[in-house]
Image (cartoon, grey):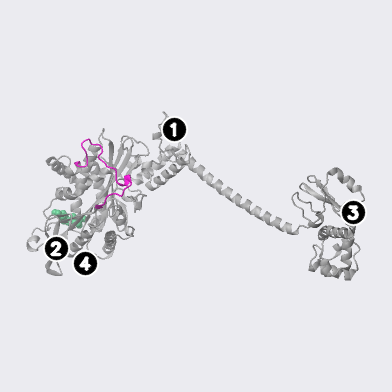
Amino acid sequence: MFTLTQIYLRKLESLKTRGARTPPALSSCRDSRGAGRCHLSKIGTGRRPPPARVRVAVRLRPFLDETAGTSEPSCVRAIDSCSLEVANWRNYQETLKYQFDAFYGERSSQQDIYAGSVQPILRHLLEGQNASVLAYGPTGAGKTHTMLGSPEQPGVIPRALMDLLQLTREEGAEGRPWALSVTMSYLEIYQEKVLDLLDPASGDLVIREDCRGNILIPGLTQKPITSFTDFERHFLPASGNRTVGATRLNQRSSRSHAVLLVKVDQRERLAPFRQREGKLYLIDLAGSEDNRRTGNRGLRLKESGAINASLFVLGKVVDALNQGLPRVPYRDSKLTRLLQDSLGGSAHSILIANIAPERRFYLDTVSALNFAARSKEVVNRPFTNESLQLHVLPPVKLSQKELLGPSEAKRARGSEEEETGSPKPAAAPVPASQRFSPLQKLSNMDPAMLERLLSLDRMLGSQGSQGTPLLNTPKRERMVLLKTVEEKDLEIERLKMKQKELEAKVLAQEAAEEEAKENAVSLLRPLPCHTVTVAKPLKKAVVMPLQLIQEQASSPHAEIHILKKKGRKRKLKSLDASEPEEKPQDCWELEISPELLAQGRQKILDLLNEGSARDLRSLQRIGQKKAQLIVGWRQLHGPFGQVEDLERVEGISAKQMESFLKANILGLAAGQRSGSS
Ligand code: ADP
Ligand code: MG
């Protein structure tokens, strides 16, 4: 079959030489100057794109056995070029009538279908919009014939490719405002696996959606094609990949969905250097027959299950779109996920429902017609995929990676990285607009990732950050930049931790101060500059200049105590002449006359020897327990000889005794003084 494909060419060429060189439907998309052929989409101007209903055509194939038609009447009868009727099997007196955008009877040619239903939507590709053609129907009804055809009767695929390539050659010629390029990918969905027919070793591929809602298959091979021969060179062996399966698996080709994806990429040659991408899906769906009637078993049943599942979901998607349901179950099957931007999405779509005239197809025919009738209610909103070129590239030169399949590209990547790793001496200064990362061309980047990088780049720009573009920089610079960002993030984290620690410290300090304030009654405690910790005796404190202190000390009527400013870290004499203390800060220090101290000590001693437990509790630092211990000690050992004997009481340490003295002596001394005055 494939050796005969040159016949396609000759046949198509002859078809073309008979008619206009460029089909009228296609030429209508150009204006007289050749410029302004592409209109900005409504989405580009901020308005909602106009709706475009899914077009539905029905094609009835002739009886396969010439003699069958004479003995068996057709189940389907044409009414006009858009309508048909089918006998109602419940009541043979009645017929079921259907109306579509076009009905092609058994005598219709491949050219009729192509020119009538497919060619008109191709022009949208050159407007940067998407288009799709789906062949639907039961196995044997003529889907592959319609899409692929035969060398004698080429179908939609070769015709569309021929026209598209010719059109892009004309439109992208030197001197035209846009440079155009075409790439093709070819895949099949078999048992819910997406298989790259141009690189069969690549395995199941994933389907993704970019931020604009475009469906992508990362890793799918894209081959650039500039002529029909190019197309054949890739398409025919790829179809062979299916054919090998078909021989082995028996009709595998009719049990998988075959998807040919043709992308038309346009780049404006002059400012503002827009770029557009239009995608054309040409899909030969698997048979829609009801497998309950085919008696499939084993693998065939499993296949049927998968086929039916995806076609069943396709039906659900169509119903959800028709009913305007909030959730359309695109993700429930690979097929519908792939068709997401073709059904109820951004594409100009045409569904060709293929039906057969034989009675044995009757039920499948009715079900295919019902599905087609539901599909024509679906409304798409095609828009132009247009963006500004990030870099002004030499017109549409594809990278080595694009020229290779993904696995070849993977192999090549290693050496590419090595190359980029070693800095080459720059022969001439490279213009800023051409400073690409040699590793990651933006055109090769996942659009969602690109979009995120761009917004980050814009954000940096809006913050006045200069010279830090994340894009359009060589790989090394970009890596350095990303590393710096990472380090800054870590630094911020570290600072945040530190701040938390400090806050905790401050809180703890405040709590401690609060506690200290409550307990602060010590007379000898150096008084902070701004606070007076002992309220009662300090009421009469007199702050005096230093020279007066000497006179005061020698005077027989000296004040009980004075406050005088002490220098930093001055050593103080403790009340009982114990070890001097180290005082860390400037402070006011209390100085008390020795007689008063002696009186205070005596009063404490009296209390220790005569006071009841209750009396003792009136002293500072003496609680119930200590008071009882003191009374108990007194009963055992007799009276205290001096206040320091307190240390001998079990449970009272020397330190506690000292702090007890400090806490009480001034209060008692003051009481003595006020009592005597
Ligand atoms: P499907 O892909 O739907 O299973 P095919 O395209 O393989 O069906 O068609 C089944 C058979 O019918 C093929 O032999 C094909 O050549 C033939 N056929 C289908 N449609 C037509 C048509 N319009 N005119 C002539 N033969 C047709
Ligand atoms: Mg087929």
Question: In the rendered structure, does residue 355 fall within the stretch colored magenta?
Answer: no
**Mark 4 highlights which residue?**
293
Residue located beneath label 1 in the image: 424
Span of residues in magenta: 27-52
**Label 4 to label 1, Cα distance in Å?**
68 Å
Residue 409, given in percent of the width and then of the height, sits at 36, 43
The reply to whether the residue tagged 2 has its Cβ within 8 angstroms of ligand 1 is no
Mark 3 Cβ and ligand 2 under 8 Å apart = no
Q: Earlier in the sequence, mark 4 or mark 2?
A: 2
Q: Disc 1 marks which amino acid?
A: Lys
Earlier residue among tags 2 and 3: 2
Q: Going 20% across and 51% down the picture, which residue do you hit?
A: 147
Q: Which label sits in the foreground, 3 or 1? A: 3
Q: Secondary structure at mark 4?
A: helix
Q: Which mark is residue 86?
A: 2
Query: What is the x, y in percent for residue 524?
Result: 81, 54
Q: Earlier in the sequence, mark 4 or mark 3?
A: 4
Q: Amino acid at mark 2?
A: Val
- 10 Å crowding of disc 2: few (<14), some (14-19), many (20+): many
